[in-house]
């Protein structure tokens, strides 16, 4: 059910590839809000034993994915360009602006898909919606809970014109 572009996240580096292989899709897609916050699903917070409003998540980029892992100073190797952000009382975490920008998250493209990995990290990838007919993403409109792009919509319109 995912339209996440898998080829984008698979690199040729064998160690990278190995890491990717352990990626598990959760099927959870959530919107990042206007302030850059996203609710981490409760089951994932539980799995990481994250206490809301107490614990923090370490956030960094890995290719086209955002990695979240429990912030545990001293327990993990220090990562360059990672930031620690506290999980708020609603289970939300603020994704830094640079990270959002790097991933291409905008006011329009703001759905993120959650993945888990065997090492306990949570990964977020930009979820691009697409047309149910052609997979395109131009001028998407929804019709009966399916998305149709402008091109297909036009063709459908022409079809109905022919019939009439
Ligand atoms: Zn289409």
Image: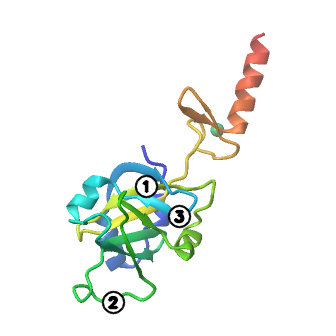
- SS for tag 1? strand
Rendering coords of residue 17 (x, y %): 35, 72
Work out how far the residue at label 1 is from the one at label 2, CA to CA, in angstroms: 26 Å
Label 3 CB less than 8 angstroms from ligand 1: no
Indicate which disc, 3 or 2, sits on the residue closer to the N terminus: 3
Give the camera-side residue of 156 and 70: 70
Q: Please tell me how crowded label 1 is: few (under 14), some (14-19), or many (20+) other residues with Cα within 10 Å.
A: many
Residue at x 24%, y 89% (from the top left corner): 74
Question: Compared with residue 20, is residue 78 higher up or lower down, i.e. above or below?
Answer: below
Q: Say left or right for 61 vs 47.
A: right
Rendering coords of residue 70 (x, y %): 28, 73
- SS for tag 3? loop
- SS for tag 2? loop
Q: Say left or right for 100 vs 73.
A: right
Q: How many marks?
A: 3
Indicate which disc, 1 or 3, sits on the residue closer to the N terminus: 3
> Residue at the top extreme?
164
**Quadrant (top left, top right, bottom left, bottom right) of the N terminus:** top left
Give the camera-side residue of 32 and 127: 32
Q: Please tell me how crowded label 2 is: few (under 14), some (14-19), or many (20+) other residues with Cα within 10 Å.
A: few
Per the image, the residue denoted by label 2 is 78
Per the image, the residue denoted by label 3 is 36
Q: Quadrant of ligand 1?
A: top right
Work out how far the residue at label 3 is from the one at label 2, CA to CA, in angstroms: 24 Å
Q: Say left or right for 80 vs 126.
A: left
Residue at x 42%, y 82% (from the top left corner): 82
Q: Which mark is residue 113?
A: 1
Indicate which disc, 1 or 2, sits on the residue closer to the N terminus: 2
Rendering coords of residue 25 (x, y %): 34, 54
Looking at the rendering, which quadrant does residue 57 occupy?
bottom left
The reply to whether dot 1 and dot 3 touch (C-beta < 8 Å) is: no
Closer to the camera: disc 1 or disc 3? 3
């Amino acid at each position: 059910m995912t339209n996440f572009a898998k080829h984008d996240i698979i690199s040729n580096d064998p160690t990278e590839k190995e890491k990717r292989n352990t990626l598990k899709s959760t099927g959870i897609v959530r919107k990042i809000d206007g302030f850059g916050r996203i609710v981490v699903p409760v089951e994932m917070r539980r799995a990481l034993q994250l206490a809301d409003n107490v614990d923090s998540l370490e956030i960094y980029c890995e290719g086209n994915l955002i990695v979240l892992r429990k912030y545990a100073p001293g327990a993990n190797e220090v990562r360059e360009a990672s930031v620690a952000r506290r999980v708020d009382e609603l289970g939300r975490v603020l994704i830094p602006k640079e990270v959002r920008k790097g991933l291409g998250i905008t006011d329009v493209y703001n759905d993120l898909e959650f993945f888990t990995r065997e090492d306990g990290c949570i990964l977020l990838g930009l979820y691009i919606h697409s047309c149910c007919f052609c997979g395109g993403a131009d001028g998407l409109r929804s019709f009966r809970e399916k998305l149709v792009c402008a091109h297909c919509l036009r063709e459908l319109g022409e079809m109905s014109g022919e019939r009439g």
